[in-house]
């Protein structure tokens, strides 16, 4: 008899795993059934802000594979089906068909929990007023795009993380008056050093986006529709509010089934994506991953991690042996012409983790200074004192700045030092960099401090 694999959650982690398992084991050997609560599978949440902005016109183009395409691979996908319980003793899940309103039991031999993360919901007054939205699911993106297309007005984005910034760009280019309110002293304050966060704030203000820092939203006002956002000492008119307060792992199902959670609150997994329960696997935003610099578990919500962790789970479920090598939390975003990226640890994080760390800084231009598209770029390189081992980097700058972070991610991944990086044979031509790239200069500055 064939084994039965049930996948809970039909996006990046779940469907990567299902596809990889199927490549290695035919349908006569492994039955694969995936349950997805929403109407979509295998979609790119990452593309949602660009749909709202109007850069990507068709929502459907954010979908990598449809249930029909999975069916052609003998993967049985059920959208609008929510798993409401995992019964480890019976080796079964309880599934609610959201269309028909009935529940049924599906047995499994192997189970993959890939339930992802959900947007954080504030408990403030007015949360449920009309006109208050999140940007998490494709349905959220479709609704926000409809609103953006229907006219213009005042939008308040609550939260200065990358989803908040991407939402701010989307409505700015759609002609709305945008205000970003954040409790942080800067935007992206969990990603960037504060002065680099300030550069992003300055670039937003230059294009007319209002940024309100160090301010908590206390209430959303209106009778049925939102009309304004109330903060401790200011009120901001709002026809629309987009909440971008971060995300938390969806672990309630796993927790209720007695599956061990880790210190981050996400599902604890080993380097094969196995949970502590036999035959139960987990990957993606709902699961922990090991940070390669600290060696500690983290729960970072990125599509890059979800795809790779899902792939590892799927290879293992397919009968081969794959190890998830860990993460650096490498992330990249932009707001209009300002690009932002980061990898590894910031100086403050490195110190909090017990590293004797230094930071090398460099500000210059993205291209040769004389080239017409030259714009400012700042790079921060964090390294361990004495050894010079690179442990983090952040970049803020104009077009072409942010993808330089991949050099740092590769360097950290392979335990390079700032002394090495300062001499690496990087490509040069005037439209792309100076003859010494800012990467070299920032690494050289870090080496000077690290080695004394
Ligand atoms: P999810 O994508 O959250 O999928 C989990 C799925 O499980 C969901 O579809 C959910 O409906 C389903 N589910 C949950 N519970 C159940 C249940 N009980 N029964 C059935 N189904 C269930 N990452 C990047 O790396 N780069 C980016 O540029 C980027 N941009 C982003 C922009 C936005 C607006 C958002 C929201 C996220 C972005 N991300 C980005 C993060 C990235 O999208 C996530 O890390 C990735 O989608 C995680 O994949 P996942 O499969 O773990 O979880």
Image (tube, rainbow, N blue to C red):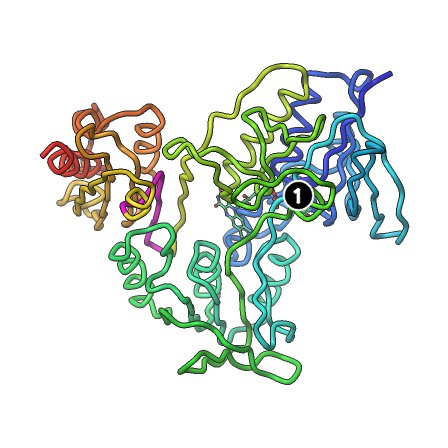
Residue at coordinates 48% horizontally, 67% vertically from top-left? Answer: 158
Q: Quadrant of the C terminus?
A: top left
Quarter of the rendered structure image containing ligand 1: top right
Q: Circle 1 is placed at which residue position?
A: 115
Q: Position of residue 345 (x, y in %)?
A: 33, 41
Residue at coordinates 30% horizontally, 28% vertically from top-left? Answer: 411
Ligand 1 within 8 Å of disc 1? The answer is: yes
- Residue 76 drawn in magenta: no
On screen, residue 74 above or below 381: above
Residue at coordinates 43% horizontally, 80% vertically from top-left? Answer: 232
Which element carries disc 1, helix, strand or loop? loop
Residue at coordinates 33% horizontally, 23% vertically from top-left? Answer: 414
Drawn side of residue 347 relative to residue 152, left or right: left
Q: Position of residue 153 (x, y in %)?
A: 51, 76
Which span of residues is magenta-colored? 336-347
Drawn side of residue 32 relative to residue 123, left or right: right
On screen, residue 111 above or below 190: above
On screen, residue 250 above or below 429: below
Q: Position of residue 227 (x, y in %)?
A: 55, 82
Count numbered badges in the picture.
1
Q: Position of residue 363 (x, y in %)?
A: 17, 47
Q: Quadrant of the N terminus?
A: top right
Asked where in the image residue 286 lies, by quadrant, the reply is: top right
**Residue in the foreground of this view, choosing between 400 and 10:** 10
The residue furthest bottom is 223
**Residue in the foreground of this view, choosing between 217 and 291:** 291
**Residue in the foreground of this view, choosing between 63 and 361:** 361
Drawn side of residue 431 relative to residue 300, left or right: left
Drawn side of residue 393 relative to residue 136, left or right: left
């Amino acid at each position: 008899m064939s084994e039965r694999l049930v996948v809970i959650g039909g996006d990046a982690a779940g469907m990567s795993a299902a596809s990889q398992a199927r490549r290695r084991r035919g349908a006569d050997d492994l039955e694969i059934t995936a349950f997805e609560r929403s109407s979509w599978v295998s979609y790119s949440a990452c593309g949602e802000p660009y749909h709202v902005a109007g850069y990507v016109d068709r929502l459907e183009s954010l979908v990598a594979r449809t249930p029909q395409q999975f069916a052609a691979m003998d993967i049985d996908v059920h959208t609008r089906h929510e798993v409401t319980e995992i019964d480890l003793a019976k080796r079964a899940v309880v599934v609610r068909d959201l269309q028909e309103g009935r529940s049924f039991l599906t047995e499994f031999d192997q189970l993959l929990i890939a339930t992802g993360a959900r947007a954080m919901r504030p408990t403030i007054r007015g949360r449920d007023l009309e006109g208050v939205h999140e940007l998490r699911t494709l349905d959220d993106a479709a609704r926000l795009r409809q609103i953006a297309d229907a006219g213009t007005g005042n939008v308040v984005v609550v939260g200065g993380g990358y989803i908040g910034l991407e939402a701010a760009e989307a409505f700015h280019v759609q002609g709305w008056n945008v205000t970003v309110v954040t409790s942080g002293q800067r935007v992206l304050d969990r990603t960037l050093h504060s002065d680099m966060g300030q550069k992003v704030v300055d670039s937003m203000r230059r294009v007319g986006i209002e940024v309100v820092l160090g301010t908590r939203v206390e209430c959303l006002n209106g009778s049925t529709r939102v009309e304004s956002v109330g903060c401790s000492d200011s009120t901001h008119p709002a026809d629309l509010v987009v909440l971008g307060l971060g995300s938390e792992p969806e672990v309630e199902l796993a927790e209720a089934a007695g599956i061990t959670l880790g210190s981050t609150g996400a599902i604890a997994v080993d380097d094969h994506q196995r949970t502590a329960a036999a035959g139960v696997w987990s990957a993606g935003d709902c699961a922990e991953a090991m940070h390669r610099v600290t060696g500690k578990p983290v729960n970072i919500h990125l599509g890059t991690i979800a795809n790779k962790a899902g792939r590892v789970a799927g290879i293992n479920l397919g009968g081969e042996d794959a190890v998830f090598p860990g993460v650096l939390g490498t992330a990249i975003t932009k707001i209009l012409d300002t690009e932002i990226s980061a990898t590894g640890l910031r100086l403050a994080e490195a110190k909090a983790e017990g590293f004797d760390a230094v930071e090398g800084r460099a500000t210059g231009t993205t291209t040769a200074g004389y080239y017409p598209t030259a714009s400012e770029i700042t790079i921060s390189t964090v390294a361990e004192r004495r050894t010079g081992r690179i442990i983090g980097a952040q970049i803020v700058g104009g077009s072409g700045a942010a993808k330089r972070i991949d050099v740092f991610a590769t360097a950290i991944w392979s335990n390079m030092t700032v002394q090495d990086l300062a001499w690496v044979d990087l490509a040069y031509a005037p439209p792309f960099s100076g003859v010494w790239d800012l990467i070299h200069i920032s690494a050289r500055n870090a080496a000077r401090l690290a080695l004394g």
